[in-house]
Image (cartoon, rainbow, N blue to C red):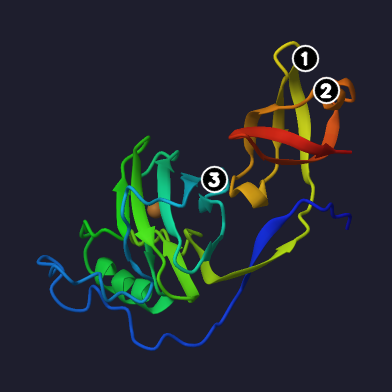
Amino acid sequence: MMKNLLLTTALVLTLTAPAFASGSHSDSHDEPKADDHAAMMIGMPGDATKIDRTINVFMRETDDGDMVFEPKSFEIATGETIRFNVVNKGELEHEFVIDTIEGNAAHKEIMAQGDMEHDDPNSVRLDEGGEGEIIWTFANAGSFEFACLIPGHYESGMHGPITVGEKIAQVAVEYTTGKIKEINAKAGKVTIIHGPLVNLDMPSMTMVFRADKEMISKMSEGQDIEFVADRVTGKLTVIEMK
Ligand SMILES: [Cu+2]
């Protein structure tokens, strides 16, 4: 597969088994202690003034009866503080919970006994159309999980891996496929219906990008392209295309 030389960070993982169980929910669920979450293997609530990165997370049902999160996985550097901006684009209530795989499994058991609601800093529960956030600092390297623990939802597809590791090298990034929907050459903007932008942690959607004159001169509406986008002075910009 063709790769370009866009530089991005990669993670190296030290996937040892968690040294201690996560169990923020092992005892009293209704009366969380002040330090309850400080001891979680996955990390701790983050400082809203020290966010390293925002990741958009969408929750929805599919036409064939599955329930999904987009994106399907997260890669996070140890120590990073992430703001998860979570949007329920479905027609059912959903939640976004981050924990160890074991922690989610235990929590799921409890929820199966009755559809209890929780309000922990590592979770957000949203009605149809709702939007919420979790701000979280991933203190430890390892394999974790995000999930919806509403009975039946995990089994319908609502879970995915969170990989936390050391930031090390810079690697090549693959092109994303897309279709050009609209070009505004004067404004230097192009609307692209695109696949997941892995380097930007963005799922498939239709989005407006910047592009320079030379890039736009190679584009036409309706054209199928492969491209690489990145932030250039804060704006999402098409930096490579073929
Ligand atoms: Cu759900």
Residue 172 location (% of width, % of height)? 78, 58
Q: Residue at x 38, y 71 (%)?
A: 42
Q: Which mark is residue 185?
A: 1
User: Mark 1 belongs to which amino acid?
Assistant: Ala
Is residue 209 or residue 115 the one in the foreground?
209
Alpha carbon separation for disc pair 1 and 2: 7 Å
Task: Answer with left or right where residue 169 lies relative to residue 66.
Answer: right
Pointer 1 or 2: first along the chain: 1
Task: Answer with left or right where residue 125 lies relative to residue 203.
Answer: left
> Would you place residue 219 above or below residue 227 in this image?
above
**Label 2 crowding class (10 Å Cα cut-off): few <14, some 14-19, many 20+?**
some
In this figure, which residue is indicated by the disc labeled 2?
216
Task: Answer with left or right where residue 236 lies relative to residue 219.
Answer: left
- Which marked residue is nearer to the observer: mark 3 or mark 1? 1
> Would you place residue 99 above or below residue 3 in this image?
below
In this figure, which residue is indicated by the disc labeled 3?
62
Q: Residue at x 34, y 37 (%)?
A: 130
Q: Give the residue furthest to the front.
A: 233
**Label 1 crowding class (10 Å Cα cut-off): few <14, some 14-19, many 20+?**
some
Is residue 11 or residue 96 the one in the foreground?
11
Q: Are marks 1 and 2 in contact (CB under 8 Å)?
A: yes
User: Mark 3 belongs to which amino acid?
Assistant: Thr
